[in-house]
Image: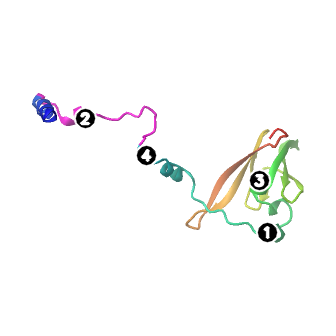
Amino acid sequence: MLSIFLVVFVCSLGLPLELLAQVYNPRGKRDPFINLQEIFRQEQPQVFIPELPPLSERPLGLVGLAISEVTVTGVAIGEGRRVVILKGVDGFTYLAREENKLFDGYVFEISEEEVVFVQEVLDPRGGRETLRVVKRLFTEED
């Protein structure tokens, strides 16, 4: 009964109901009624990383190793450019410069503390996508 009285009273003031409606102001907080799993599923790229063939069926050397199969063990400066020292799962150590090719990508950028790789993957529609993979310099403390 009271709610009907309030509606009639507000309407008698001549104010439109849209002005009196409450609006939710999140103030930078997330909406508590949104499913977090849906948000995370939308933010993650939908890509397909194909299974790698065995090392014996790939080319020898660094071009036969995937980005996930190398560890950054050092960075040096050679000929005025940075060179990254990579340790492969095959037990060998490799030197690589920017734009050197690996099995599933290439070295994009070398800094003093990390190396940025670009990994080439497949999207669900069969097209090619690229992902940035950042590997930090391996230290004894890690």
Callout 2: SS: loop
Helix, strand or loop: magenta stretch? loop
Q: Between residues 79 and 59, which one lies in front from this camera angle?
A: 59
Callout 4: SS: loop
The Cα–Cα distance between marks 3 and 1, rounded to whole angstroms, is 24 Å
Name the colouring of the figure.
Answer: rainbow
Q: Which residue is mark 1?
A: 54
Check the picture and name the quadrant holding the C terminus.
top right
Q: Which residue is mark 2?
A: 21
Check the picture and name the quadrant holding the N terminus.
top left
Of mark 4 and mark 2, the one earlier in the sequence is 2
CB within 8 Å, label 4 to label 3? no
Q: Which residue is mark 4?
A: 34
Q: Between residues 34 and 83, which one lies in front from this camera angle?
A: 34
Q: Between residues 66 and 26, which one lies in front from this camera angle?
A: 26
Residue 22, position as x, y percentages in the image:
28, 34
Callout 3: SS: loop
Magenta-drawn stretch contains 128: no
The Cα–Cα distance between marks 4 and 2, rounded to whole angstroms, is 22 Å
User: Which stretch appears magenta?
Assistant: 13-32
Of mark 4 and mark 3, the one earlier in the sequence is 4
Give residue 99's mark: 3
Of mark 2 and mark 1, the one earlier in the sequence is 2
Of mark 2 and mark 3, the one earlier in the sequence is 2
Question: Residue type at mark 3?
Answer: Glu
The Cα–Cα distance between marks 2 and 1, rounded to whole angstroms, is 64 Å
CB within 8 Å, label 1 to label 4? no
| 102 relative to 1, above or below | below
Residue 16, position as x, y percentages in the image:
17, 34
Residue 74, quarter of picture: top right
